[in-house]
Image: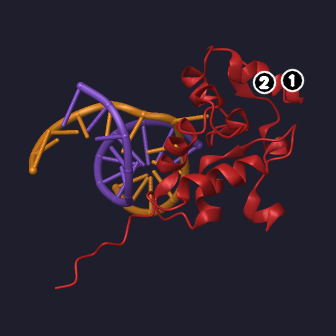
Chain colours: A red, B orange, C purple
Amino acid sequence: MNTPQEPTETQRNFFQDVHEVVRLIPPGRVSTYGAIAHYLGARHGARMVGYALIAAVPARGLAQVPAQRVVNRNGLLTGRHHFSTPTAMQEALETEGVQVIDDQVQDFKNVFWDPARELL
DNA sequence: GTGTTGACCCCCC
DNA sequence: AGGGGGGCCAACA
């Protein structure tokens, strides 16, 4: 009978939603995929969040989304390899005031910014 | 159309 | 306390 013409969440504004949250990340702070996913409902898993950032890379000329402020749960710059340069992410974070050593965010616990906790 | 990987995280042993 | 496996949805080959 009725055919499910309803688009999937990804087809919806999920990508744009992630971009908006990442854009709200204040300078000098970093967020995590799980935190963002959890803020959005944690239904698609953190993996999709990272995928959404791929489409948000400023190198593509799309919306300026500070994807460099998004790191993994370990505070490691997992997505540095996806940037224009392997050091672009680290350079950007250090410019923001975030100290990064060996692709690892120092004092990650302090610079960690949780949208569902502070943004609310 | 099927199979595999992926900017990951959580649960179980 | 540490280690291993499964899960989530989507895009690419």
Name the quadrant containing residue A73: top right
Give the structural element (helix, strand or loop) at label 2.
Answer: helix
Observer-nearest residue: A109 or A12? A12
* SS state under label 1: helix
Neighbor class of circle 1 (other Cα within 10 Å; few <14, some 14-19, many 20+) is few
x and y, in percent, of residue C12 in the image: 32, 31
Residue at left offset 53%, top offset 45%: A52
**Distance of mark 2 from mark 1, alpha carbons?**
5 Å
Q: Position of residue A83 (x, y in %)?
A: 60, 22
Picture layout, residue B8 above or below residue A115: above
* A83 to the left or right of A113: left
State which quadrant residue A91 falls in.
top right
Q: Which mark is residue A63?
A: none
Chain label for disc 1: A
Query: What residue sits 45% from the left and 63% below the top?
Result: A9
In the image, residue A2 above or below residue A63: below
Q: x, y percentage for residue A49? A: 54, 48
Q: Residue at x 58, y 40 (%)?
A: A53
Question: As rendered, which of B12 and A51 lies closer to the eye?
Answer: A51
* Tag 2 and tag 1, C-beta contact below 8 Å: yes
Q: Is residue A18 above or below residue A103?
A: below
The C terminus of chain A - image quarter: bottom right
Q: Quadrant of the N terminus of chain A?
A: bottom left
Given the image, on which type of amino acid does mark 1 rest?
Answer: Thr
Position in image of residue A33 (x %, y %)? 60, 48
The label shown at residue A95 is: 1
For the residues beneath circles 2 and 1, the answer to whether they share a chain is yes
Instruction: Please give the label number shown on residue A92.
Output: 2
- Is A7 placed left or right of A56 in the picture? left
User: What's under tag 2, amino acid-wise?
Assistant: Ala
